[in-house]
Image: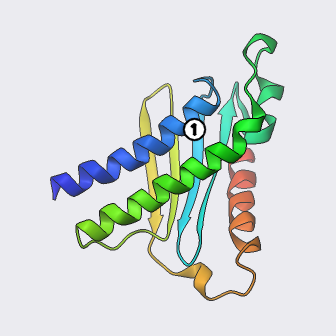
Amino acid sequence: MAQFEDKFMEVQASMVSLAMEYVQDQADKIYIYAIADSLYSFNLFYEINGNVVHKHLVNNFLPDDSQVDIGLQSILLREGIKDVENMIKICQEYGREHPTEMWLVYDVQKNRLESRYSYEGRYEKDDDLELLPRIEFEKWFEEVQGQ
């Protein structure tokens, strides 16, 4: 049991590390939304200096001398999908059900990861699979932004 949990946590830590690398360790919090259902999706946003921002707008909230290469977004998302796939492999290896949705919040200052999982197959039922994950992601973004 502990071995599965350790490997599962390693995948989540990899997602957080990937997100921190993108902003060169300049975020206060990281919010990751991942889907492993009939499609795979990985997206994230940040809290930087008290502002909740999408990944493509992080430079608006970072000092001029420490801007990030926004062109790396596609690599960030691709690598995030690889982590999602790795999570599924680990669950299969240990005969465990994998989450279909994950909401991860990493607080950099407290070095604390909060996670919420769903095991429902929400996205296999709907016609517009491309749109629905984006809507869920944006809904979460707006919810956090409003806090």
Residue with the mark numbered 1: 19
How far across and down, in percent of the image, does residue 124 sit? Answer: 59, 85
Coordinates of residue 109 in the picture (x, y in percent)? 49, 25
Name the residue: 25% across, 54% down.
5
Residue type (three-letter) at the residue carrying disc 1: Ala
Q: Quadrant of the N terminus?
A: bottom left
Relative to residue 38, is residue 113 depicted above or below? above
Residue at image x 77%, y 34%?
Answer: 70
Camera-side residue of 77 and 113: 77
Question: Is 96 situated above or below 68?
Answer: below
Q: Of residues 116 and 121, which is closer to you in this image?
A: 121
Q: Where, by quadrant of the figure, is residue 129 drawn?
A: bottom right
Q: Can residue 57 be seen at all in this image of the molecule?
A: yes
- Residue 104 shown left or right of residue 46 in the figure: left
Q: Is residue 17 above or below residue 131?
A: above
Residue 119 percent location from the top left of the image: 44, 74
Quarter where residue 134 is shown: bottom right
Q: Is residue 147 visible?
A: no
Query: In the image, what residue occupies the spot 55% across and 65% down?
Result: 35
In the foreground, 46 or 59: 59
**Is residue 88 positioned above or below 103 on the image?**
below
Q: Secondary structure at mark 1?
A: helix
Mark 1: few/some/many CA within 10 Å (<14, 14-19, 20+): many
Colour mode of the rendering = rainbow
